[in-house]
Image (cartoon, rainbow, N blue to C red):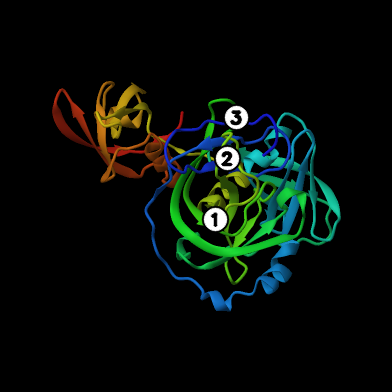
């Protein structure tokens, strides 16, 4: 939350500002976004069984502080014995053009790191660190097993303060949150994000959100603030932070490690939101379509208005993007759409981006 960030506000009642949680540099920015949730449930540990001190002893050696020249300070987690470090793209994006990245370990030692690959769409990246004698990979959990209300612990370097631990609960699940990208007009989408009231502040980005067994269940990525009277974000955590679920983060990281990039599914169309007379969402207008893409092959055409996506009302362009991030090429979903006053249904098979 440094100087030079771009802010957009809507009028209305209390609105959260989503902030990419990195310290220093013109990184991330601010955006107002309506949060959408399909809250689920799953297994989890009782609050009384969670010892933050034991988790800190186990996991702090697996969490590193990341410093980027001409950038800022963020966090990361060592995910294997080869020295791969999982973090957020916005933490290290400033070094993508040739800047220097340094990883500081729990014991205070530091090593230079190289960027293995990054995925701006999901705001994830992988670094490689070599030469450190002793690595402590973090144990990976399953975000699908996280329950609302389950205790969690966040580890990282908020405000540049390495080896910091905060605790709370998973206060909601399956959030869809849009956060600013590195270029004007560019955004990243957090899908199925874990919401937590464990304090998430600038510098926590890329670190670890773990369960009571110390298993990594999410990558803290953004925090929410409430605008003050001047329209500026208030300082510090207000108890709403968001983490990329490890089930998605692990899949993206494995692809980056294997190929240097992450491949996402492809639909092949661009849509704009249709607003009803009362200002509510009235579907998605197909503004452009790849004539050789999956949507066109399913029968969709420019000018169609999509009203349902996979059984849910079409309320946001992000719904289609989320499908490409959560599913692989070859997966199918149904859309209902209107053309010339008549309703139609199509089955779209996701493809691979050209």
| Front position among marks 2 and 1 | 2
Q: Which residue is mark 2?
A: 228
Left or right: residue 260 versus residue 160 is left
Query: What distance separates the C-alpha of mark 1 from that of mark 3?
Result: 29 Å
- Count of number-bearing discs: 3
Q: Residue at x 61, y 31 (%)?
A: 182
Location of residue 120 by image quarter: top right
Query: What distance separates the C-alpha of mark 2 from that of mark 1?
Result: 33 Å
Helix, strand, or loop for circle 3? loop
Of 290 and 23, the residue lying toward us: 23
Residue 129 percent location from the top left of the image: 77, 49
Q: Which residue is mark 3?
A: 6
Residue 108 percent location from the top left of the image: 85, 57
**Residue 109 versus residue 222 in the image, above or below:** below
Residue 95 percent location from the top left of the image: 73, 34
**Residue 23 versus residue 283 in the image, above or below:** below
Q: Which residue is mark 1?
A: 246
């Amino acid at each position: 939350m440094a100087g030079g960030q771009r802010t957009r506000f809507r009028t209305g009642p209390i609105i959260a500002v989503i902030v990419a949680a990195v310290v220093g540099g013109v990184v991330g920015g601010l955006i107002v976004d309506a949060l959408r949730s399909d809250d689920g449930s799953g297994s989890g540990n009782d609050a009384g069984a969670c010892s933050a001190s034991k988790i800190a002893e186990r996991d702090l050696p697996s969490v590193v502080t990341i410093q980027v020249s001409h950038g800022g300070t963020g966090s990361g987690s060592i995910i294997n014995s080869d020295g791969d470090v999982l973090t957020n793209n916005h933490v290290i994006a400033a070094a993508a053009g040739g800047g220097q990245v340094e990883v500081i370990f729990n014991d205070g030692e530091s090593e230079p790191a190289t960027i293995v690959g990054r995925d701006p769409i999901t705001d994830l990246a992988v670094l490689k660190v070599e030469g450190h004698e002793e690595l402590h990979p973090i144990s990976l959990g399953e975000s699908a097993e996280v329950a609302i209300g389950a205790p969690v612990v966040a580890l990282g370097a908020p405000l540049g303060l390495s080896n910091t631990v905060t605790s709370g609960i998973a206060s909601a699940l399956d959030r869809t949150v849009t956060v600013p990208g590195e270029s004007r007009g560019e955004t990243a989408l957090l899908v199925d994000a874990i919401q937590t009231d464990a304090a998430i502040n600038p510098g926590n980005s890329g670190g670890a959100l773990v369960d009571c067994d110390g298993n990594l269940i999410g990558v803290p990525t953004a925090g929410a603030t409430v605008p003050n009277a001047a329209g500026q974000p208030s300082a510090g955590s207000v108890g709403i932070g968001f983490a990329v679920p490890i089930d998605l983060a692990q899949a993206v990281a494995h692809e980056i490690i294997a190929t240097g990039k992450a491949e996402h599914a492809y639909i092949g169309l661009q849509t704009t939101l249709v607003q009803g007379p009362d200002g509510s969402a009235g579907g998605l207008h197909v503004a452009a379509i790849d004539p050789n893409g999956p949507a066109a092959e399913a029968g969709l055409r420019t000018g169609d208005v999509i009203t349902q996506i996979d059984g849910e009302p079409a309320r946001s362009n992000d719904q289609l993007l989320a499908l490409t991030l959560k599913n692989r090429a070859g997966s199918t979903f149904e859309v209902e759409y209107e053309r010339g006053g008549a309703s139609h249904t199509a089955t779209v098979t996701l493809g691979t981006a050209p």
